[in-house]
Image (cartoon, rainbow, N blue to C red):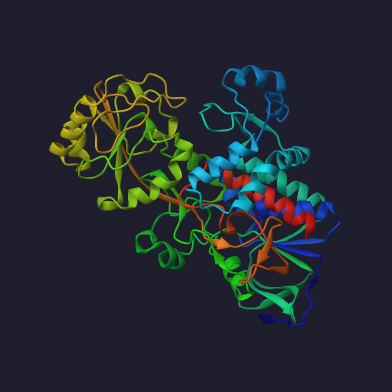
């Protein structure tokens, strides 16, 4: 523990570290309770927003159609658009999806709290002025509405509400240490504008909400392995683990899937990192339509079941599979029938090439032609009944293949053919700080460290192995709201 240097620069009730969605939810929740709040944000003001500004989906429960429609600006129109595709989504459904994705390893206490509180927190966000809209493509296993305006609008509203409640935000401010007076939280030390001069804020409670360590190449290599050290970060460059390591110095434990991460198939032109203004490009660069075709590696072999589950239950673990392949690259292959269903991003600066001859495409990308031809011939021959719709799992599987395609089996036979090169993008890491259902940071003996809270992707134990799409924003909102309410 770092002893208090009683240099009073600022004093407040609550210090929140990080101004992503989780941190702003915590700050707003605390301010609504009458607490004075200061946020330390590592980024410059012009780049504020965090990874939250680059996303758009919340996973939450709803017991009837009305509960979704009332979150939009046009409830009647929303009802017309989604009524035929609507299914209730209960807390037990949400909990089961978390357990399925994590192979039963996610913290049961956190998963239960997340699933049971999700809709009430969505209603709280609605009360702040957030609105939802119908997704252009509604897939099975996802909530049919998304935050209106995407993550950029989510964060603009969050900042506006926080500032209207008197929350003070200090930009370009990096957490150094948590300060204790004996064993009681006394504040934080931080530095600004990349200087070595330390400043102190004295406070009664601290909420850590500054994400994982995915932008720290040394820590990524140390925890995930050397293969991950140069993987492009599909998010902001500011999440380098300061909150995690400050908490560990304060007595917290590093917990959860320490070697795991959210990593997804991305276009080959992915940038080393992204900033909040890059939302459109981040979405365009996603390559999540693997279920519409097949995916092969450099030697022309398939290496995973493209129809194992709905894409939003599969995409977040595929980055790791791609890294294991020769040259750390793979190729999604479509014929003209499914290529017509691909989103805009596949056709914008994507490296995708089309031809009437698969052999020419193989030659262009340096894929072994003989292996690829055999792989596609065997794949086509394994399909008795072809899929014609791709909105929900259809059970139309291949037969006799070592690696099956369990749903959406359609032959690669109709030219022109399309091959899109795909690499890995790292979104966030899974290992983090251990908390309880009250968002209190726990010490090595599982007792709360009084006055210390955490929320968002800095939390360990919420994700293992894989990820149910939309869980991250909801996790940050639920535990941010809880932390602010009780800190």
Say above or below: 327 vs 288: below
Say above or below: 445 vs 90: below
Residue 289 seen:
yes
- Label total for image: 0
Lateral position of residue 52 relative to residue 38, left or right: left
Q: Quadrant of residue 224?
A: bottom left
Q: Tell which residue pokes out farthest to the left in this image.
A: 370
Q: Position of residue 355 (x, y in %)?
A: 23, 28
Lateral position of residue 446 relative to residue 357, left or right: right
Q: Quadrant location of the N terminus?
A: bottom right
Residue 57 seen:
no
Q: Quadrant of residue 205?
A: bottom right
Q: Position of residue 88 (x, y in %)?
A: 63, 28
Lateral position of residue 166 relative to residue 380, left or right: right
Q: Quadrant location of the C terminus?
A: bottom right
- The front one of 484 and 438 is 438
Q: Position of residue 137 (x, y in %)?
A: 52, 26
Q: Position of residue 249 (x, y in %)?
A: 60, 75
- The front one of 464 and 218 is 464
Q: Tell which residue pokes out farthest to the right in this image.
A: 34
Q: Quadrant of residue 9?
A: bottom right
């Amino acid at each position: 523990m770092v002893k208090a240097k009683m240099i009073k620069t600022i004093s407040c009730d609550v210090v929140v570290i990080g101004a992503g969605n989780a941190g702003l939810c915590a700050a707003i929740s605390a301010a609504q309770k009458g607490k004075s709040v200061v946020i330390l944000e590592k980024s410059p003001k012009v780049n504020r927003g965090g990874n939250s500004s680059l996303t758009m989906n919340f996973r939450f429960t709803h017991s009837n159609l009305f509960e979704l429609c009332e979150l939009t600006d046009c409830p009647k129109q929303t009802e017309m658009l989604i009524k035929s595709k609507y299914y209730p989504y209960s807390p037990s459904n949400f909990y089961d999806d978390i357990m399925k994705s994590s192979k039963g390893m996610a913290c049961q206490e956190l998963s239960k709290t997340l699933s049971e509180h999700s809709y009430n927190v969505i209603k709280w966000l609605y009360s702040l002025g957030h609105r939802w809209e119908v997704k252009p493509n509604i897939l099975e296993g996802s909530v049919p509405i998304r935050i209106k305006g995407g993550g950029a609008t989510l964060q603009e509203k969050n900042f506006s509400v926080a500032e209207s409640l008197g929350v003070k935000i200090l930009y370009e401010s990096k957490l150094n240490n948590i300060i204790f007076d004996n064993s009681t939280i006394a504040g934080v030390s931080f530095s600004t504008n990349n200087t070595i001069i330390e400043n102190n804020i004295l406070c009664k409670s601290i909420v850590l909400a500054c994400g994982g360590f995915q932008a720290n190449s040394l820590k990524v290599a140390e925890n995930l392995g050397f293969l991950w050290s140069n993987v492009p970060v599909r998010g902001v460059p500011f999440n380098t683990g300061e909150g995690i390591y400050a908490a560990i110095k304060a007595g917290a434990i590093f917990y959860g899937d320490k070697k795991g991460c959210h990593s997804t198939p991305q276009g080959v032109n992915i940038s080393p990192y992204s900033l909040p203004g890059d939302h459109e490009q981040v979405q365009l660069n996603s390559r999540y339509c693997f279920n519409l075709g097949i995916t092969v590696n450099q030697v022309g072999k398939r290496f995973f079941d493209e129809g194992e589950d709905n894409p939003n239950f599969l995409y977040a673990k595929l980055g790791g599979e791609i890294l294991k392949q020769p040259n750390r690259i793979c190729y999604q292959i479509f014929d003209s029938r499914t290529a017509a269903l691909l989103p805009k991003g596949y056709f914008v600066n994507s490296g995708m090439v089309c031809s009437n001859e698969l052999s020419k495409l193989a030659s262009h990308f340096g894929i072994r032609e003989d292996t690829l031809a055999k792989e596609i011939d065997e794949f086509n021959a394994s399909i008795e009944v072809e899929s014609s719709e791709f909105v929900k799992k259809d059970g139309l599987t291949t037969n006799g293949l070592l690696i099956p395609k369990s749903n959406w089996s359609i032959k690669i036979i109709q030219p022109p053919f399309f091959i899109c090169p795909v690499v890995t993008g790292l979104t966030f890491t899974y290992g983090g700080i251990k908390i309880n259902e009250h968002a209190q940071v726990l010490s090595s003996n599982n007792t709360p460290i009084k006055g210390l809270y955490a929320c968002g992707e800095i939390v360990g134990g919420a994700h293992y192995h894989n990820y149910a799409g939309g869980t991250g924003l909801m996790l940050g909102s639920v535990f941010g709201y809880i932390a602010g309410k009780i800190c």
